[in-house]
Each structure stands twice: as C-alpha cells, then as structure tokens.
Image: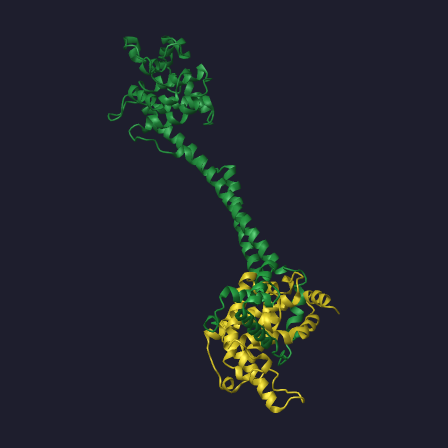
C-alpha cells in the first residue's frame, strides 16, 4: 500500500495502517530526537509521544509532505522534552556511565579494527557533544539541515521560522560547530581535518 | 565564535553556508565566486564549513531502540468510532458557541421587550412635581395633555364637565381651610398645562390666559364662578352657553348629567369621560372619588401586563434555557476534543 493510502486509512482510524507509517519513519524520528536531545531514553520518549500526537492530529494533515509534517511534530516533542528537563533537572547514575548507547557505534563491522572502531565512536561522541553545546534553535536547524539534509524551505516549514531566520541560525550553528570541532582535531580523520587552524 | 579564529564576518559566513547548500541566488552567487577566486581566507573558510557539514552528514542513522507502533487495543477502537469525520469534535464546540451567542441575543431582546412594556405601565404612576398641587395637577396633567392635540372634543363633553364642576363646588363640598379656592386650583392647573394647551377647546377647562381677564364678578356671576371661568375664552364653543342654563344645572341634585355620563361610561380611556373626569378631579372637593378612580385604573394596569411584557418574558426564559443547553453542548464538545 502506498503512503497516501496508508495516510487515508489511518485518518479513518485504522491503527494498523498508521503503524505501517510508524515502521517507515521511526528510525528517522528517533535519530532526529536523539541528535536534538542527546539522550537515548529522552529521544525514545519524545519519538513515542510524537507518533501518538501524529495519530491524534492526523485529521489536521492537509496533504503536504508527510515526512516534513511528522518531523515538525517530532521537533515540537523535543522542545517539550527540553522544557521538561529544564524544569526538572535530574542526572541518574546510568547517565553518567552511558557514553554512546544509541549511536550504532557499538556494532562495528568486520572490516574495521577495534582501534578504528573506538576512534570512530569517539569522533561521533565528540560531534554529538558539539551539537549539545549549541543553543536549542541552532541545534535543531543544524540537525535538520546537516544530519537529515532538509532544504531551507523544508526547515522553515518544519520549524515555522522564516527562511531568513533559518539561514542565519544555520550559519551561526556551523560556525560554532567548526570552532568546537577544532578542539578535537586529533580525533578527526585526515580528510576531515580543518585547514583554518 | 568563528570571529575569534577567522576574520569571517557574520554576513560572509551566511553567504558561504548558503553557497555550500546551493541556496544562494544568482547575483550573490556570482559575486561570491569572484571573491572566492581572489581571497584565499574565504576559500579556507568555505573548506572548513564543508568539512564540518561532511562530519555531521557522516553521523550514522540510528536505529530505534524499540517499536513505536501504537497499540490498536488502546488507540484503535475509540478513534475509529468517532473520528471518521474530520473536526467532528470541533462541531460540538462550534454549535455550542453559536447557540450561546444566539441565546444571549434572545435574552437581550426579551429583556428589552419586557422593559418597554414595563415603562408603558409605569408612566401613569409617575408622581407630580409638587405635593401642594398634586390634587389639581395630577388629573389635569394626565388627561388634558392627550386631549390638547385633538381639538375635536365635543362641546357637549366640555359642557358636561363645566356643569359638573359648577354643581359640585358651591353646593356640597366646603373648601378645606388649607386648600386653595377652586379658582386658584384651576389657575394653577392652567399654568401647569399651559405649554401643552395651545388653543382651541382644550383650553376651556382652564381660565383663559389671554384674557384674560375674567370678567369682574357680578351678582349673577358670583354663583357660577367655576362655570364662567371654564367658559371664559371668547370664541370658544362654550360661549354659547347661557347663564340661565348654568342656573338650571346648578339647581339640579348632585348626580349631574356629566356624572351620570361618567358612570355610564366607566372606561377611562374614552375621551368624553376623561374630560368630565378632568374637571371633576381638578376640583378639590371631589378629591377622594377621583383618587380612588385613578388608583383603580392604575391597579388594573398593574394587574394586566401588556402583550409585550409577556412576549419579552417568554423570550427571556427561552433564551436562558437555550443558553444553558448551548453551554452544555460546548462543554461536551470540549471534553471530547480533550479526550482526543
């Protein structure tokens, strides 16, 4: 069944049809939530809330790009989670020992050595730390543009910001990321070494 | 910030990012490419931004730690039952809001109609200005004013009023010591009603202002002062009345023809009876009867509300009932929407 047919069926209350859509987009939703929130459990909660909200608000979907519409709900769920975390700041012992549980870097291919695998995991952790250091709005736009590769007008539709705002926030985010990654340049592969040092 | 490590301005950084993403329009794009060809630092900054972007794009796509599929037992049945129509839950709220607005309008219209009817019945109950002139002025103000614009009052009616006044005062009721004599009472009534009584037969009930000068009391006229004063204006229909007729009428026993006419026609809204009533009430001697008659009339008006009153009350009650129903409908819709 095509995506539009699944959407129509889900709008009529067919949960099974909606769950087909969930299976298509749950990895994307979780990735975006994790890059924005920086924590796997929070990201899973935000993604789950986003899918529930999407099902309940499906009658408001007017036929635009479904992925962009879903990403908007995921982004809003992440903002809600960030606000909740600021209201109730709490750090568990699990958080302190948790380094990269959701990053996929724990599964390494047979083609890379353990040293290469460790270096790659460390690089990804460094990039995520640089992302976490950004202000919320800049982090959201950086994830949507450079991780999910959305165009400016799509980001504007997802976030509800004007395209000019998207441009300026993205340029500031990239400038900060560049400066942050200079600090971990020894972790970077040779082809990614920043030249302006 | 990037400015600490390179002289790149915010504007150049934004241009380079847009150029990197292919989002730079042609005039700016051409200008930036010319600068890139000239400025090595700008090229280095572009390379740094490109490397940063590639690092981010090189991040692996994560796999969801669990399935986010919804449980059909929790979400399926309830949603499938009533969410088939988009914005179904909003229809309740919209209907409730519109109904509440219409109900409020109905209540306001009903209250306005009831208020208008109440004013109509309350108008005759308005007190007169001065307690001292209350006896003389109250009936005059009520009945002379409406009769002023209708100069069709028949001479017979005025006639009967004149006879009634004449017959009552000298014969039966002694003037109370504190009350003004009949001439003064009538003059005061005439002054009070003067702005409303321009000319014509309506002026017959009072002393002629232009004139004037009532004729000096003669021996014949002494006996008939009220009647003569009532008939004083020159050219008025009452002029034709002769003094002998006054004398005859004065010698008749009290239930005069005017009084009989009044009793025969008890309806207070009829013009001739009102005229007779005016003259009777204008005289202090017949005070109690006039007051009782007025009180009875007012009590009738109080006891029988007008049609507007009833309609207004009904509209108000219906509006209130509809308002309650609309609020209940709105709350039900809101509850459904929240449940959704």
Q: Is residue B55 above or below residue A57?
A: below
Q: Position of residue B244 (x, y in %)?
A: 37, 8
Q: In the figure, is residue A114 to the left or right of B118?
A: right
Quarter in which the N terminus of chain A is drawn:
bottom right
Q: Is residue B275 visible?
A: yes
Q: Residue furthest front?
A: B38
Q: Position of residue B257 (x, y in %)?
A: 42, 18
Chain A visual colour: yellow
**Chain letter matching colour green:** B
- Counting every numbered tag in the picture gives 0
Q: In the figure, is residue A114 to the left or right of B320?
A: right
Q: Residue at x 56, y 57 (%)?
A: B330
Q: Residue furthest right?
A: A1
Q: Residue at x 38, y 13 (%)?
A: B249
- Give the color scheme: rainbow, by chain, secondary structure or one colour: by chain
Q: Is residue A184 above or below residue A156?
A: below
In this view, the residue in front, B313 or A110, is A110
The image quadrant of residue A167 is bottom right
Q: Is residue A5 above or below residue B139?
A: below
The image quadrant of residue B44 is bottom right
Q: Position of residue B10 (x, y in %)?
A: 49, 65
Q: Residue at x 49, y 66 (%)?
A: B9
Q: In the figure, is residue B211 to the left or right of B37?
A: left
In this view, the residue in front, B213 or B303, is B213
Q: Residue at x 33, y 25 (%)?
A: B136
């Amino acid at each position: 069944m095509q995506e539009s047919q699944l959407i129509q069926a889900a709008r009529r209350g067919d949960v099974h049809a909606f769950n087909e859509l969930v299976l298509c987009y749950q990895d994307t939703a979780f990735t975006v939530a994790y890059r924005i929130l920086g924590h796997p459990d929070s990201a899973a909660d935000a993604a789950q809330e986003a899918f529930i909200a999407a099902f309940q608000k499906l009658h408001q979907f007017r036929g635009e790009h479904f992925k962009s519409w879903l990403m908007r709900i995921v982004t809003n769920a992440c903002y809600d989670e960030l606000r909740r975390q600021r209201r109730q700041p709490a750090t568990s012992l699990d958080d302190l020992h948790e380094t990269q549980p959701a990053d996929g870097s724990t599964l390494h291919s047979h083609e890379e050595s353990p040293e290469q695998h460790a270096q790659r995991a460390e690089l990804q952790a460094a990039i995520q730390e640089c992302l976490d250091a950004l202000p919320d709005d800049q982090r959201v736009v950086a994830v949507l543009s450079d991780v999910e590769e959305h165009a400016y007008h799509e980001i504007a539709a997802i976030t509800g910001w004007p395209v000019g705002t998207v441009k300026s926030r993205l340029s500031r985010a990239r400038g900060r990321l560049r400066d942050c990654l200079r600090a971990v340049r020894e972790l970077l592969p040779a082809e990614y070494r920043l030249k302006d040092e | 910030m990037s400015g600490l490590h390179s002289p790149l301005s915010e504007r150049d950084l934004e241009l380079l990012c847009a150029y990197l993403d292919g989002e730079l329009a042609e005039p700016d794009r051409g200008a930036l490419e010319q600068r890139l060809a000239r400025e090595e630092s700008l090229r280095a900054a572009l390379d740094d931004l490109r490397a940063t972007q590639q690092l981010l794009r090189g991040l692996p796509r994560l796999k969801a730690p669990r399935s986010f599929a919804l449980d059909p037992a929790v979400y399926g049945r309830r949603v499938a039952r009533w969410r088939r129509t988009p914005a179904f839950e909003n229809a309740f709220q919209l209907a409730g809001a519109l109904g509440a607005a219409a109900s409020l309008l109905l209540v306001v219209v009903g209250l306005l109609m009831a208020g208008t009817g109440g004013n109509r019945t309350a108008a005759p109950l308005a007190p007169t200005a001065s307690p001292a002139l209350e006896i003389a002025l109250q009936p005059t103000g009520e009945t002379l004013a409406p009769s002023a614009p209708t100069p069709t009052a028949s001479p017979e009616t005025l006639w009967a009023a004149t006879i009634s006044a004449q017959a009552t005062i000298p014969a039966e009721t002694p003037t109370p010591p504190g009350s003004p004599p009949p001439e003064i009472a009538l003059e005061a009534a005439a002054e009070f009603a003067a702005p409303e009584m321009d000319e014509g037969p309506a002026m017959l009930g009072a002393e002629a202002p232009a004139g004037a000068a009532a004729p000096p009391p003669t021996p014949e006229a002494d006996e008939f002062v009220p009647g003569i004063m009532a008939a004083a204006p020159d050219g008025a229909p009452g002029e034709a009345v002769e003094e002998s007729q006054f004398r005859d009428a004065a010698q008749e026993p009290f239930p005069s023809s005017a009084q009989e006419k009044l009793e025969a026609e008890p309806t207070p809204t009829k013009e001739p009876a009102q005229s007779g009533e005016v003259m009777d009430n204008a005289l202090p001697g017949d005070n109690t009867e006039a007051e009782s008659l007025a009180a009875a009339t007012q009590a009738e008006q109080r006891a029988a509300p007008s049609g507007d009153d009833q309609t207004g009350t009904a509209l108000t009650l219906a509006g209130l009932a509809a308002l309650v129903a609309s609020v209940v409908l709105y709350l039900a819709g809101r509850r459904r929407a929240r449940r959704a």
